[in-house]
Image (spheres, helix red, strand yellow):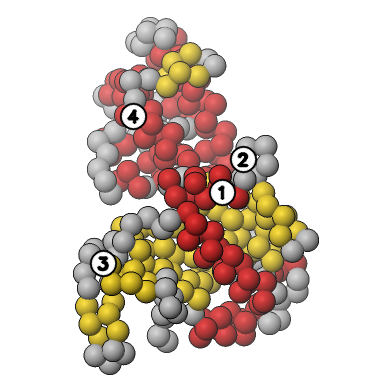
Amino acid sequence: MQLLTGINRRLIVCIRESIHSFNQYEKDAILIWDEMRTKEHIEYDKNTDMLYGILDHGEDFRELIAAKEALVFMVKGLTGHWAFPLAYYFSPDSTETTELVRILDEVLNELENLGIQVRVCISDMGFTNQGFFRNLGISETRPYIDRCDRRIYFIYDPCHLIKLVRTHLQKKTGIRYSGGVALWEHLLCSYEYDSRTENRLMPKLTNAHFELTDKTRMKVKLATQVLSHSVYAGIKTLVESEVLDEDAMESATFVKKNERYVRHHEH
């Protein structure tokens, strides 16, 4: 199958055939999109008489500008175990907010024509998506839009949020919150002490959790295992044993505030 940019008609036919036996409840769906950096490379295909690797948003939305970003959409069952790739686009940089609004409207129209009812939209917290949320009036108090007599909720990707909390804690000199100030140093000192003991308090933690690379920084489990109950309990035990200073409990409490959310994600 030739998968062209934008809404691919052949793919739409495949989706229609796959869901024709679904009841309306099974057609409730989640729409997910993400953008990733690609290698800059323009190539001519003599078989299709087309240039690839340029700004390409499907049909007539093409310009001779080298693309560096790929935007991909996927639709997934809210209650059913099904998922389909839906569309992809190439841009020279992150997709502009106004263009993302246009693309989303196009994608939602196609899904509605298929009888698929999108109930939730999920994206990461990229600058484009933040601007996109503001453009639609999405906020903490109003995390939805009303469309075609139904409500569509918008949320940021939970996995991405967990990684952001970990990365923010690692890179900043401290995170101030209602319980005090959380420091990455407390987690690191706890691990370094615990790793030298025979009976580990935090057995899942390794050097990989603290010596992060561009690749390992993307792994969700390395973030969830740091923001976990065992880390909270381990720091608390070390404070009570006077191995760590009392102020390390502020970092332990910060971990505890996040671990309930993390535990739900792991399940």
Kindly check if marks 3 and 1 are in contact, taking CB atoms under 8 A apart as contact. no
The CA distance from mark 4 to mark 1 is 31 Å
Label 3 element class: strand
- Identified by mark 4, the residue type is Gln
Residue 22 % position (x, y): 71, 76
* Residue behind mark 4: 170
**CA–CA distance in space, label 1 to label 2:** 10 Å
Labels 2 and 3 touching (C-beta < 8 A): no
Percent of width and height locating residue 123: 50, 52
Q: Residues within 10 Å of mark 4 (few under 14, many from 20)?
A: some
Give yes or no for contact between labels 1 and 2 (Cβ–Cβ under 8 Å). no
Q: Which of labels 4 and 1 is toward the front?
A: 1
Name the mark nearer the viewer: 4 or 2.
2
- The residue tagged 2 is 139
Nearest-to-viewer mark from 4 and 3? 3
| Kind of residue sitting beneath label 2 | Ser
Q: Quadrant of residue 173?
A: top left
